[in-house]
Image (tube, rainbow, N blue to C red):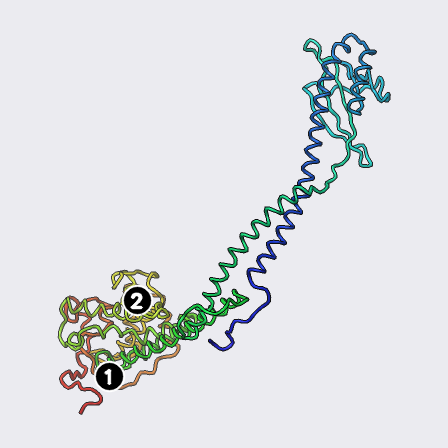
């Protein structure tokens, strides 16, 4: 086990904590539903009473219609008194003019109130102050289809007070207990599996054979999180070591290509320096800057997949040989993207021969669709090749910069070329006056593929000066550094 990663008891187990939480929730829900059930029953009773009162008001209006038409107040009083005794309510009878002709409370006699139920029977509630609420049922009195009066039934009702329904509480609580029991059983089996996975992760993190053993420990999720963090730390450390080792190996391959004069010696280092100046000028992010630097150092890695005879050939290349040479960035990207952490670097290297006008390789990307790292790499690499591999005369930095500006908007990004020119003019590069002799294989420079796309000496005679014809090429005397 890793240091500090031993599972430790942390109080109650997950299953017990889950069961207690569910029990508390079940009790709270049952208690709440007990009160809500009682309130529902009270409201249901109140609604039934209101419906009965409305029905009684309608029946009373039907019975009172002939009596009110004949103005038989005696019998109308008897009818109202019977209704009052049955419902303990106040009964009012109004004539066709809205005048009170009968009031069982003997309060509103001959009072003009107006007819409100001419459109049909309805019910309303009125607050009379001090918490007193009166429910009034109104029904029209019709005789022969003509509205001749109105009956009003008024009854005092109290506010609904919620009690507690023990039966409803017990039923809900019993159902919740059943669900808690089922959840506890499922939780126990689930936590057992979590504990097994936790033990396995700890063993993997420690480099041991993963397995399941021992008694279930407490604090399962904490242990699982700790094990995952340990595994993540181990995986990240391993990936970092793999990445560093792979980059070191790839750099050694590029250095061996330079020692064998299959690529211009020192080209990767100088390209990285020029690219760094341009990246600083446009304020590239630190992460992107480090990826660009690595891409510059590994830009020629794909030439290890190109036949040495092509790289060493002094004369013009055939179409097949030119395509093979132009495909070296794809080979480099395939080698680099094997490591997940280097996939962005691989993308920069892959598109280093794209042209700004969209006629480059391998994907014919155009303009800003080309990754900015690839555009910077193309400018830096081309500038260094123009300084070190000019054939008719040594290029100084101003002449090389002029050629880059001539290729802007067709081959290179015009904005980046302008920024690069400003950077060089503000701080000119330190280029030796006497150009050193370099052993460079003829027609193996990426600048040709980037600028013209044609083979040296074919279809584009104006650009044959980009081939290092006047450099000293010693192909027959190539020996290893350890050889005689």
The Cα atoms of the two marked residues, 1 and 2, are separated by 29 Å
- Asked if 255 appears above or below 227 in the picture, the reply is below
**Left or right for 338, reference 30:** left
Front-most of residues 166 and 46: 166
Please report the residue visible at 46 percent of the width from the left and 76 percent of the height from the top. 1
Dividing the picture into quadrants, the one containing residue 352 is bottom left
| Label 2 neighbour load within 10 Å: few <14, some 14-19, many 20+ | many
Residue 471 location in percent, x, y? 19, 82
Q: Are marks 1 and 2 in contact (CB under 8 Å)?
A: no
Residue 69 location in percent, x, y? 76, 9
Dividing the picture into quadrants, the one containing residue 17 is bottom right
Front-most of residues 298 and 240: 240
**Left or right for 164, reference 281:** right
Per the image, the residue denoted by label 2 is 412
Residue 165 location in percent, x, y? 69, 41
Dividing the picture into quadrants, the one containing residue 374 is bottom left
Residue 238 location in percent, x, y? 39, 75
Front-most of residues 204 and 397: 204
Mark 1, mark 2: which one is toward the viewer?
1
Per the image, the residue denoted by label 1 is 259
Q: Is residue 417 visible?
A: no
- Asked if 391 appears above or below 21 in the picture, the reply is below
Q: Is residue 478 visible?
A: yes
**Left or right for 114, reference 238:** right
Please report the residue visible at 50 percent of the width from the left and 61 percent of the height from the top. 191
Residue 221's tag is none
């Amino acid at each position: 086990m890793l240091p500090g990663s031993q599972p430790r008891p942390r109080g109650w187990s997950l299953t017990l904590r889950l069961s207690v939480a569910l029990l508390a929730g079940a009790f709270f829900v049952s208690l709440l539903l007990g009160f809500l059930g009682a309130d529902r029953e009270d409201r249901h009773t109140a609604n039934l009473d209101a419906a009965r009162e409305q029905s009684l008001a309608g029946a009373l209006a039907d019975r009172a219609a002939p009596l009110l038409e004949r103005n038989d107040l005696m019998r109308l009083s008897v009818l109202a008194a019977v209704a009052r005794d049955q419902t303990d309510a106040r009964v009012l009878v109004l004539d066709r003019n809205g005048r009170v002709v009968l009031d069982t409370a003997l309060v509103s006699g001959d009072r003009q109130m107006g007819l409100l139920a001419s459109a049909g029977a309805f019910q309303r509630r009125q607050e009379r102050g001090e918490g007193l609420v009166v429910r009034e049922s109104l029904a029209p009195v019709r005789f022969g289809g003509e509205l001749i009066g109105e009956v009003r039934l008024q009854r005092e009702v109290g506010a609904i007070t919620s009690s507690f329904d023990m039966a409803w509480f017990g039923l809900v609580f019993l159902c919740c207990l059943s669900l808690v029991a089922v959840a506890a059983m499922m939780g126990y089996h689930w936590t057992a599996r979590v504990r097994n996975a936790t033990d396995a992760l700890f063993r993997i993190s420690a480099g041991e054979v993963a397995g399941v053993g021992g008694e279930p420990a407490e604090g399962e999720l904490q242990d699982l999180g700790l094990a995952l963090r340990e595994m993540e730390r181990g995986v990240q450390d391993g990936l970092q070591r793999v990445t560093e080792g792979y980059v070191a190996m790839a750099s050694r391959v590029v250095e061996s290509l330079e020692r064998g004069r299959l690529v211009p010696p020192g080209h990767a280092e100088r390209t990285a320096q020029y690219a760094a100046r341009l990246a600083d000028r446009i304020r590239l992010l630190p992460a992107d800057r480090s990826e660009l630097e690595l891409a510059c150092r590994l830009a020629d890695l794909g030439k290890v997949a190109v036949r040495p005879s092509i790289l060493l050939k002094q004369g013009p290349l055939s179409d097949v040989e030119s395509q093979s040479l132009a495909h070296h960035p794809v080979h480099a990207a395939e080698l680099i993207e094997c490591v997940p952490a280097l996939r962005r670097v691989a993308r920069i290297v892959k598109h280093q021969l794209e042209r700004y006008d969209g006629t480059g390789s391998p994907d014919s990307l155009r303009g800003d669709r080309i990754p900015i790292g690839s555009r910077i790499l193309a400018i830096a690499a081309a500038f260094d090749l123009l300084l070190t591999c000019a054939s008719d005369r040594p290029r100084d930095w101003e002449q090389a910069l002029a050629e880059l500006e001539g290729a802007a908007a067709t081959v290179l990004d015009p904005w980046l070329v302008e920024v690069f020119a400003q950077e060089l003019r503000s701080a000119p590069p330190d280029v030796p006056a006497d150009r050193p002799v370099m052993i460079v294989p003829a027609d193996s420079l990426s600048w040709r593929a980037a600028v013209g796309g044609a083979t040296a000496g074919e279809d584009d005679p104006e650009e044959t000066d980009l081939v290092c014809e006047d450099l000293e090429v010693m192909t027959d005397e190539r020996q290893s550094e350890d050889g005689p």
